[in-house]
Image (tube, coloured by chain):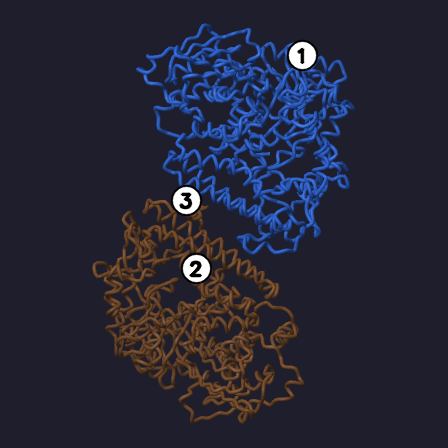
Chain colours: A brown, B blue
Amino acid sequence: MSLKKRFLYLFFMLPSLVSAEDGSQLWLRYVPVEEHIAKQRQISLANNHESALLAKQELNRYWRGTSISMHLDKKAKALKEGYQIKSDVSGIRLTAAEPIGLLYGAFHLLRLQGAKVNMQNLNIEEIPDYDIRILNHWDNLDRTVERGYAGYSLWRWDELPNTLSPRYEQYARANASIGINATVLNNVNASPQILTSNYIQKVKALADIFRKYGIKVYLSANFSSPKVLDGLSDSDPSRKEVQDWWKTKVKEIYQHIPDFGGFLVKANSEGQPGPQDHGRTHADGANMLADALKPYGGIVMWRAFVYNPSEQDRAKQAYQEFVPLDGQFRDNVIIQIKNGPIDFQPREPFTPLFGAMKHTAQMIEFQITQEYLGFSNHLAYLAPLFKETLDSDTYARGKGSTVACITDGSIFSAKRTAISAVANIGEDTNWTGHHFAQANWYAFGRLAWNHQLSSEEIADEWISQTFTDNRDFAKPIRQMMMDSREAVVDYMMPLGLHHIFAFGHHYGPEPWGDVEGGRPDWMPWYYHNADTVGVGFDRTTTGSNAVSQYNEPLRSTFNSIETCPENLLLWFHHVPWTHRMKNGHSLWEELCFHYDRGVQEVRQFQKTWDKLEQYVDEQRFSEIQSKLKVQAKDAVWWKDACLLYFQTFSKTPIPYELERPIHELEELKKIKLDMKHHN
Amino acid sequence: MSLKKRFLYLFFMLPSLVSAEDGSQLWLRYVPVEEHIAKQRQISLANNHESALLAKQELNRYWRGTSISMHLDKKAKALKEGYQIKSDVSGIRLTAAEPIGLLYGAFHLLRLQGAKVNMQNLNIEEIPDYDIRILNHWDNLDRTVERGYAGYSLWRWDELPNTLSPRYEQYARANASIGINATVLNNVNASPQILTSNYIQKVKALADIFRKYGIKVYLSANFSSPKVLDGLSDSDPSRKEVQDWWKTKVKEIYQHIPDFGGFLVKANSEGQPGPQDHGRTHADGANMLADALKPYGGIVMWRAFVYNPSEQDRAKQAYQEFVPLDGQFRDNVIIQIKNGPIDFQPREPFTPLFGAMKHTAQMIEFQITQEYLGFSNHLAYLAPLFKETLDSDTYARGKGSTVACITDGSIFSAKRTAISAVANIGEDTNWTGHHFAQANWYAFGRLAWNHQLSSEEIADEWISQTFTDNRDFAKPIRQMMMDSREAVVDYMMPLGLHHIFAFGHHYGPEPWGDVEGGRPDWMPWYYHNADTVGVGFDRTTTGSNAVSQYNEPLRSTFNSIETCPENLLLWFHHVPWTHRMKNGHSLWEELCFHYDRGVQEVRQFQKTWDKLEQYVDEQRFSEIQSKLKVQAKDAVWWKDACLLYFQTFSKTPIPYELERPIHELEELKKIKLDMKHHN
């Protein structure tokens, strides 16, 4: 270890002894316990499993309370990876069925300590809602990160397996602290190279570090790997040669990584190869991989994010393609479905595929990285977005069939349940670019463990650990976080508008966007359909009929302009500019008010933040202040771009009580950002 | 005349027959009278002077009222260039002592008609307050315009004298319509070339056009002309050879332009040559030229805008240099003094030289072009600024000795009185870049005629002629105009701050500005003196003692931080950040509130304007709308730049109720605008 690396290592291990607050410690800013306090209590452990030893180590370093005894109870299988915490006069007893449960329990205790909870009569039982709680890294082998806004990839492929960055272990510890137990290391737009023997050695090096933190490694697999890597004539899943190739490859992987998790596959989607190239179905492709993985306990996460430039509404296509395959997938295949039917927009209804495949395991895919929510420049706390989908009732088995219940195994029993999200992590010092974007990593982990937690509870936890639990700070900051995602919706795409982003980078507005000869379903006009009559995508029974993919009563509710929730109005309806909204505004006026409110909200965030300067270290204060400035400018950019553009159709003034545009539409149209490296 | 030019000519002559409203007609948007109405009344005139014939022509074309008889009464000398208008049942009688008075009277009648005044019992007598009402063009011979923001110079020197743009006559008519009777064609930073025989022919061509509109031509003279043009060993005014050169040159000019007005001279100022180069005084230099001009009735306007990088406060230097010369100037010399002691800032106190030379004629120099008020991008109605200086009491002869009375001859009798302003006119279609900047040209003319007019009256006149007299439009627009200059002060330099502009172009903010080895008196820090204690220029008796140049009670009023008007506080005092203002705010808070108010005001202007769209033609509406957007953005730029910079000294938060900055100070410091062509 070089001197510099040793220094960095020490730096991380002794967080409280240095005053720097650069965000590198995330929410793990525990203060080492003083020696005289440590002497007064005992942390006892009766086994030597490396995860359990890590638990002991964390408590030894940071626990200031009474003595703790840790126990493994292999019979308590119902706990899964969870734990029990009980306390009485004699001290605290932490019990788990798995060693990793003790580490999760230790972090739970440290959270309680941070929140100054009374430890007298604890009686806690925590069982994770999902078996697999997994991050999807869209990291390329050249260390660019698709839709990544926090620097290059954490994985230094060129140095691996010989040189090991200290950040690998820091990453694993951070994930363990919030219960994340799995990671897909590479981009779903996968390079076949990841499956070469050379790269398997590199992956093994990471897996060896992650293992004691309870984290299994998965890989995105390119469906054409047999042909590309070893010159097979094709990668047709029905051919034995191809099947054998995968079996051999999987065997090789498990030789080096015995707890390898499995494959994530993006097939026949946005140009990726897949079984349909050979006349086979998604099920044929997924099952071939599943068969290869089965002997080792591995699984396939097969993505349902598929669409083609056809006559069909893009929002309908995943459902149309996958529902007919229901029941045809092996039991170690899980269909990975994005939360909304289009693509991680600021607001979408849930994907109707949830609950529509009653004999197929399903998992959700969220996006933590803010591809469509201002990158790492905009403060947008995403727990409310995650919750909105999880709590959405699909009515697949009557009332109460929420997306959460569909995917957590409580309605349709599943061999394994899973929940995933695209990571927002890179090698930036603070991991996520925006300090507040750490909260979204945190929130995903916490919700993957317990989807009943409220967004407010998660925010409170995160704030107190990441900054301070001083209520004068925490309360307004929680409010800011809670308001933030809706602010983004307001200044970007209110009332159900979607996908009017600039082509390619998805950062700025481009409702006028059009590329000659480009795919219609990649063009903003495809989604907003603005004309002199109105705006919005008619997905009613007289339009694309996407509403029919939803169960009643949603189908009828969405289908009627009168009952459709107004925050999804333009998702399901092409609405006249003069349409009366429930508050009496015309649609045009309401659109204007939403855009304006978005701007005003961000300005309010600035005020909130500036006012709390005294509670925050200088570096993080000013870095966040700068990000908020960018967001405030961008919000006005969005507002002006969208209102000035839509006004060319509505032909109606922006209500005069609202702040006026400061941009010229024609000037905004000329803005071209060079952001290809994020794609 | 080319077909295109003929078309343009027709276009201007028939304003009402075309619907285009591009601002080219200025406030002269009279509607030609219908033939049947014209037949019912008579416009009679008993002489054939060309100015009088123009008066008749205007009335014939546009007068809809009763018959008018025009009379020249050579004995009514007291009227000067003014007129009387009387009406009774038999019609209207317009009388003037000079032919040009009839033209002025005709335009007066057309103004009354536009304002729908009852013409039954008119009894009007108008006598101009100043004899010479003169525009100073800072136009270079290459057609760039120093501090010009409305395109290239109107004067097409390369085409003159053979080709005559129709705009020359349009220019003369517009000036005549508001009583301007003189123009300096070329920049005070004068090229000697203007005095060559070749250029005199060109100037003559313009003078021949302007003459019938009552406009005399003047030229800026370069003091080194004898040496530069004809190789004299120097231009020492005490040498006969030099004196003779000027006599010969003046004679040549008058041979071609018998009513030539005289010279404007910037000498020994900002690098221009002058008598001091030869050990002579300003009086020596001015008198030499005056002697040459005297036989022909010409005058010298000698600028007092002089300062050097010395120990002395720049604000004091004009006074120090000129007061000792009082009484030494010929009676055909007028000292031309800028309204404020520094340089056309958004707000300055009046220059204390006014009234301090009791035996020397003085005239004021305003700046219509907005060198320091946002160029032609910002709406800033300057009548309130002009009035603020004119109405300032100098106490030179006790209470009531206003700058207006000092310069109009009512306190110190003067052979000739004059008032000047730097023009904002260029070859832009609308003449002045910003449509609202036309109002400043208009206002200067009207105040030069009658400095008792209120800013509101002038605004009303201008609005009704330029747009419409509909009260629903005129009232809010007048309010916007009346508020506009103070808004600029607020977002640029409130509370007496001054000259913190970006070096060179004077458009954007640069309070941090510093140029290594540059003149201190060209650096913003010279003027704001910000430090950890406070901000402002100490010109009190314990500071630079500039206050001593003012008469009592001003000297004492300005000298005390308690009595100094707050809008000039930082002009006269270095004030602690914690100083309590009259409203209870600290100085820092008050500064923040002013900057913020400036921004809010411009946003209000945008609302005002947008709301009135129905009253304005499309082209002017959208052009003004665009300018207001720029102004709104610039106001925020100014606010953020100044507050973030001064905050590095005040170390105090911007009051949290105010909108937060959206810029980074370090980013703002990097902005370099390429605007050299305006210098």
Q: Is residue A254 above or below residue A515?
A: below
Q: How far apart are the alpha carbons under marks 3 and 1?
A: 58 Å
In this rendering, which labeled residue sits more in front, label 2 or label 3?
A: 2
- Residue B592 x/y as whole percent: 59, 49
Q: Residues within 10 Å of mark 3 (few under 14, many from 20)?
A: few
The chain letter under disc 3 is A
Residue at left offset 74%, top offset 21%: B283
Q: Assign a secondary structure to mark 3.
A: helix
Identify the residue at the far left of this view: A542
Give the residue number, with chain letter if any, for mark 3: A666
Q: Which mark is residue B294?
A: 1
Quarter-of-image position of residue A326: bottom left
Left or right: residue B485 versus residue B520 is left
Residues marked 2 and 3 touching at CB (< 8 Å): no
**Mark 2 crowd level (few <14, some 14–19, many ≥20, 10 Å Cα):** many
Residue B419 horizontal/vertical position (percent): 60, 23
Q: For marks 1 and 2, give the one nearer the viewer.
A: 2
Q: Are marks 2 and 3 on the same chain?
A: yes
Specify the amino acid type for callout 1. Answer: Lys
Front residue (pair B483, B322): B483
Q: Which residue is mark 2?
A: A487
Circles 3 and 1 on the same chain: no
Mark 3 or 1: in front is 1
Residue type at the position of mark 2: Ala
Q: Is residue A638 above or below residue B153?
A: below
User: In terms of sequence position, does the residue under pointer 2 or pointer 3 come before the other?
Assistant: 2
Quadrant of the rendered image containing residue A595? bottom left
